[in-house]
Amino acid sequence: MQTEQSHISIVGLGPGPWESLTLEAAGFLERTPEIYVRMATHPSVRSLREHVPNLTVHSFDSVYQEHDGVGSVHDCIADELANLAQHSSSVVYAVPGSPTVGDSSVRLLLERLKSLEIPFKIVQGLSPIESILQAVGVVDASWLEVFDAHEMEALGRENAVGEVPGDSVRRPWRAPVPTAPALVSGLHNRSVASGVKLWLGKYYPEDHVVHIVRVAVSVRPEAYPVPLGELDHSVGIDDSTFLFVPPLTETQNVRTFTGLMQLTRTLRAPGGCPWDREQSHSSLKPHLLEEAYEVLDALDSGESALIAEELGDLLFQVTIHSQIAAESGTFTIEDVIEGIVRKLIGRHPHVFGDMELSSAQDVRHAWESFKQREKPKRASVMEEIPSGLPALPRSNLMQKRAASVGFEWPGVDEVLAKVDEELVELQSEIRTGDSKELQREEFGDILFALVSVARHLRIDPEEALRLANRKFEHRFTQVETRVAADGKVLRDLSPAQLDWYWNETKAAAGES
């Protein structure tokens, strides 16, 4: 049970030496009988003991030993401190530098204290940032990003959905701004440095020179450069080590969305590419379609590198359309992102709210009602179906919309019967020699019915036809090769001979 007037004080120990403490922090610590620190070996703690010899210091060294290299170590520290605060009238937690700069243990602790409604006090300390920047020769570090090494280490080990082994908390998506300098605090040891290297390696080249900075070994920090790829093999990494990451140039920032947007802006800016500068929404429409179809081809190929390349080409279409709109003041890439994020959150209340949808089918049924609620003025479910869609996927979408409001065949057997009926009607039109318009209409009815068959079988008709096309193309080229190898010409062969080559090609491939 929380004791009466329980509270916790979080004190900043500054860059290291006693002389670097603020007057408030020094006076506070001189009046404090006992404190908790992350690691007793930190130089700032050693300096503190020299000036306040009667001070009792409790450390969390054992937590670091038990969780060596694990990003959840600060979670453990925050949990233990919050528990102590619940059962003690006063707890003092002292951290190197400033409590509010680059220390995730403080952030996590404050989250717990607020949820437990335990009062806290921050006694500020000087951040070592200024002295570190001086040590690496940086005069103006605008847009400096500050990271905690243990959090970064966890990010380096997370999987594609943000899960970290040994950590129950799913991590949020994080990315640095590589064109801005970055400072990483609490490098601690080689294991943590390895995780930091993994995460930074997603965005920076391995040969990018970073600077290991040791503070509190003297009044002036020591810094030495090392390639990022060798960070975890460096000597001299301990609990007083920081890492300074110099910024990348614009053309080096090739692995972030900000880099792509900056590239797009540069291409469209004065002095950029003449072709890109003259493009408009209208002129880019063919390229958008072309890139989308190239993505489909890449997906069919199953080649990961090709899929990634073609998705990149498609993504560029999104950025350049957004840039063109931004230049005319109509919308920006931020509007594009906000629109889709808000839409997806609103249409997934079973993920971001309290609605329960247990199956994919339940989600599909709810999807149309979500859209109707967002656009209540829509008089028909057929509204807003893109007229520019190719006929086959447009037919599929129209039928799905109709089915969502109950206009649907009972089952696939009834649809197959409809296909047979339409086929008979087409045969009749052909036999009687009716006009091409009527024959075309009956043929269209067959295709429309076949799309319904695909829907009932949960097959994408466009995808099915594309795969059939690819299969035919492959077989036909094999037939061409065989015929040429036999010294013959395709157009000179009889239907029976062509059929023989076709069947031989299928048999050679083990196909039926």
Image (cartoon, rainbow, N blue to C red):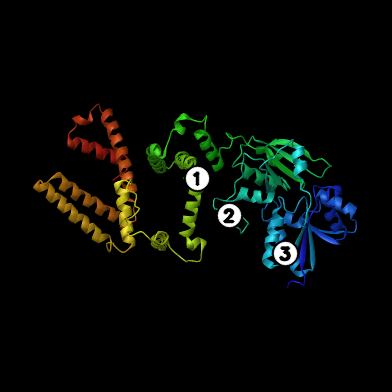
Q: Quadrant of residue 488?
A: top left
Residue at mark 1 to residue at mark 3: CA–CA distance: 44 Å
Q: Give whichever of discs 1 and 2 has the lower sequence position.
A: 2
Q: Give whichever of discs 1 and 3 has the lower sequence position.
A: 3
Q: Nearer the viewer, residue 500 or 366?
A: 366
Examine the rendered structure and indicate whether residue 446 appears above or below residue 244.
Answer: below
**Percent x, y of residue 25:** 83, 55
Q: Nearer the viewer, residue 141 or 204?
A: 141
For this orientation, the residue located farthest to the front is 329
Residue at mark 2 to residue at mark 3: CA–CA distance: 25 Å
Q: Which residue carries the number 1 mark?
A: 332
Crowding at dot 3, Cα within 10 Å, few <14 / some 14-19 / many 20+, comes out as: many
For residue 363, side relative to residue 427 (left or right): right
Q: Nearer the viewer, residue 38 or 18?
A: 18
Q: Say which element carries label 1.
A: loop
Depth check, mark 2 against mark 3: the one in front is 3
**Which residue is depicted at the point 77% across and 38% down?**
135
Q: Amino acid at mark 3?
A: Ala
**Which residue is depicted at the point 59% across and 35% down?**
250
For residue 321, side relative to residue 135 (left or right): left
Q: Amino acid at mark 1?
A: Thr
Depth check, mark 1 against mark 2: the one in front is 1
Q: Give whichever of discs 2 and 3 has the lower sequence position.
A: 3
Do callouts 1 and 3 mark residues in contact (Cβ within 8 Å)? no
Residue at mark 1 to residue at mark 2: CA–CA distance: 32 Å
Q: Say which element carries label 3.
A: helix
Q: Which residue carries the number 3 mark?
A: 82
Q: Which residue carries the number 2 mark?
A: 163
**Percent x, y of residue 119:** 74, 65
Question: Would residue 18 be seen by someone viewing this image from the given angle?
Answer: yes
**Which residue is depicted at the point 48% across and 43% down?**
329
**Which quarter shows the N terminus?**
bottom right
